[in-house]
């Protein structure tokens, strides 16, 4: 079950990765509107283009889920998800539901109006169905007379029938599901700043398991009628409230994590500081500009779990404070300087510069608390005690053609060789693997190759934390595995 949710969380990263494009385009529209002092044809053109992406979030999640959960990331799974998604949304339009249930359109449950191209919940369900059918039937051989429809061609056909069945089931149970999701969303929203703080706390705690992406989808998209990211980008909602499930991350990612990195560097052994500095500086730059914090977090979350709990508490506190004072800014990818700059002209941004003031306070908090905790409890953060940083060989990442070839080769060896690797995918910063036996993985060799950290669950699941260049590494590893 844990593996299922880890894979689902990873799958949701694919559609989320498309959001920065929408944010940039909408940001251009807001900038043009601010410069001209009014809406213009050009600004409306850019705004409509950006909203075109956001209005298709349900479809994008269906495709992303199908690709991420299928065993081969095959286009047939994505096509099947598209077929299934459009069938469900077409069948369950309110005017069609009125015909099926023999009632006036105005009496149809309001939840059916939410089954459209932006419905992330329906997208995830359809994506899971398409992935299951692909995994189960993509290799199926039909009798000779029907052989044209064998294998991958069979999957969209089966998905179409499965979508009809799903639509029939939802016809009767969707009002109950929708009401439950809305009630959950209203409960969280009703908790106000406290709810935002609790979300921030659990968001960080779930990172080691890779489940935070699944939690994020509840608050950032229209799963439980919260839809914080999309509403902020659209510029609809309540100033000071819309964006509260994002705003508090800016002080943590832009200021807190670099401060934690500085504390880890200052408490490292003298002979280790040079090696620790390289890792921490790269992580701090990534966190500040892009909002990617995992290279720093994975450097201490397992060797000093107490620090990670402190980090989760401080994150929750940051979201609570920002929500309490109604300081809001938004992002489409993560809470770094790039997204913060794009959100400044958004009409939903409310006293966003106060988040930078809060960030300075959190820089001091993180540095003082982390440094004191490391010293007081003798925590074995990188560069301390047995947690010495392995020296990365200079040819780990070569320059010129095949830049990541040596690094990929060493990673494959560290994973126990190509025969031990069953499946490889990646998210924003990690390689996610299914292997035959975790015991064959050499953590030290992987870190020598340039990995930040390694996590394992069960006997067959592993994650190798690489950093923001993980896509290039993953592509090279896959190329070498194929050849």
Image: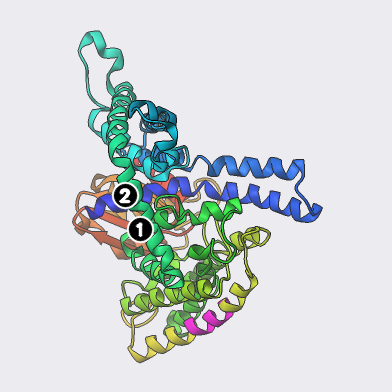
Residue located beneath label 1 in the image: 184
Q: Secondary structure at mark 2?
A: helix
Residue at 46%, 45% in the rendered image: 15
Residue located beneath label 2 in the image: 7
The residue nearer to you, when weighing 69 against 198, is 198
Give residue 483's quadrant in the image: top left
Residue at 69%, 50% in the rendered image: 28
Quick check: can you spot residue 428?
yes
Provide residue 398's location: percent of width, then percent of height. Answer: 50, 54
Determine crowd level at label 1: few under 14, some 14-19, many 20+ residues with C-alpha closer than 10 A.
Answer: some
Badge number at residue 364? none
Provide residue 33's location: percent of width, then percent of height. Answer: 75, 52
Residue at 32%, 32% in the rendered image: 167
Give residue 61's quadrant in the image: top left
Above or below: residue 109 compared with residue 281: above
Task: Tell me, yes or no, whether the two marked residues, 2 and 1, touch with CB atoms within 8 Å.
Answer: no
Q: Residue furthest right?
A: 36
Asked if residue 361 lies in the magenta stretch, the reply is yes
Provide residue 361's location: percent of width, then percent of height. Answer: 55, 82
**Label 2 – label 1 distance at C-alpha:** 24 Å
Provide residue 468's location: percent of width, then percent of height. Answer: 49, 57
The residue nearer to you, when weighing 197 against 141, is 197
Quick check: can you spot residue 388?
no
Determine crowd level at label 2: few under 14, some 14-19, many 20+ residues with C-alpha closer than 10 A.
Answer: many
Q: Residue furthest top?
A: 145
The residue nearer to you, when weighing 59 against 95, is 95
Magenta range: 359-366
The label nearer to you, 2 versus 1, is 1
Q: Secondary structure at mark 1?
A: helix
Which of the colour schemes (rainbow, by chain, secondary structure, one colour) is used?
rainbow
Asked if residue 176 lies in the magenta stretch, the reply is no
């Amino acid at each position: 079950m844990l593996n299922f949710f880890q894979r689902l969380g990873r799958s949701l990263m694919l559609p989320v990765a498309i959001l920065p494009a929408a944010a940039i385009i909408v940001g251009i529209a807001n900038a043009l509107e601010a410069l001209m002092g009014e809406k213009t044809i050009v600004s409306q053109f850019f705004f409509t283009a950006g909203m075109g992406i956001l209005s298709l979030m349900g479809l994008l999640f269906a495709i992303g889920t199908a690709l991420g959960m299928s065993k081969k990331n095959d286009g047939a799974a994505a096509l099947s998800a598209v077929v299934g998604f459009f069938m469900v949304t077409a069948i369950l339009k309110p005017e069609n539901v009125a015909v099926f249930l023999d009632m006036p359109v105005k009496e149809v449950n309001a939840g059916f109006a939410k089954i459209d191209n932006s419905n992330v919940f329906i997208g995830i369900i359809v994506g899971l169905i398409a992935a299951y059918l692909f995994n189960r039937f993509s290799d199926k051989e039909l009798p000779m007379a029907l052989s044209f429809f064998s294998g991958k061609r069979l999957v969209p056909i089966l998905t179409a029938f499965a979508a009809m069945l799903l639509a029939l089931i939802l016809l009767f149970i969707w009002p109950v599901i929708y009401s439950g999701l809305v009630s959950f969303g209203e409960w969280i929203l009703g908790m106000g700043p406290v709810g935002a703080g609790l979300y921030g706390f659990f968001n960080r705690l779930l990172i080691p398991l890779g489940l935070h992406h699944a939690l994020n989808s509840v608050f950032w998209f229209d799963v439980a009628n919260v839809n914080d990211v999309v509403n902020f980008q659209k510029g609809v909602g309540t100033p000071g409230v819309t964006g509260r499930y994002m705003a508090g991350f800016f002080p943590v990612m832009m200021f807190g994590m670099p401060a934690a990195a500085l504390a880890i560097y200052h408490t490292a052994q003298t002979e280790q500081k040079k090696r620790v500095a390289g890792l921490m500086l790269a992580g701090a730059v990534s966190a500040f500009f892009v909002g990617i914090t995992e290279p720093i977090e994975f450097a201490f979350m397992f060797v000093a779990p107490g620090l990670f709990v402190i980090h989760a508490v401080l994150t929750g506190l940051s979201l609570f404070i920002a929500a309490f004072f109604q300081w809001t800014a938004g992002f489409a990818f993560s809470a770094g300087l790039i997204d913060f700059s794009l959100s400044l002209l958004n009409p939903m941004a409310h006293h966003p510069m106060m988040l930078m003031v809060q960030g300075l306070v959190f820089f001091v908090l993180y540095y003082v608390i982390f440094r004191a905790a490391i010293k007081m409890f003798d925590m074995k953060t990188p560069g301390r005690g047995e947690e010495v940083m392995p020296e990365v060989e200079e040819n780990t990442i070569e320059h010129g053609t095949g830049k990541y070839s040596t690094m990929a080769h060493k990673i494959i060896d560290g994973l126990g060789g190509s025969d031990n690797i069953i499946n490889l995918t990646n998210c924003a910063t990690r390689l996610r693997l299914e292997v035959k036996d975790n015991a064959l993985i050499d953590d030290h060799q992987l870190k020598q190759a340039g990995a930040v950290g390694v996590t394992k669950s069960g006997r067959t699941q592993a994650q190798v934390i690489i950093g923001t260049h993980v896509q290039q590494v993953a592509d090279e590893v896959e190329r070498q595995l194929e050849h």
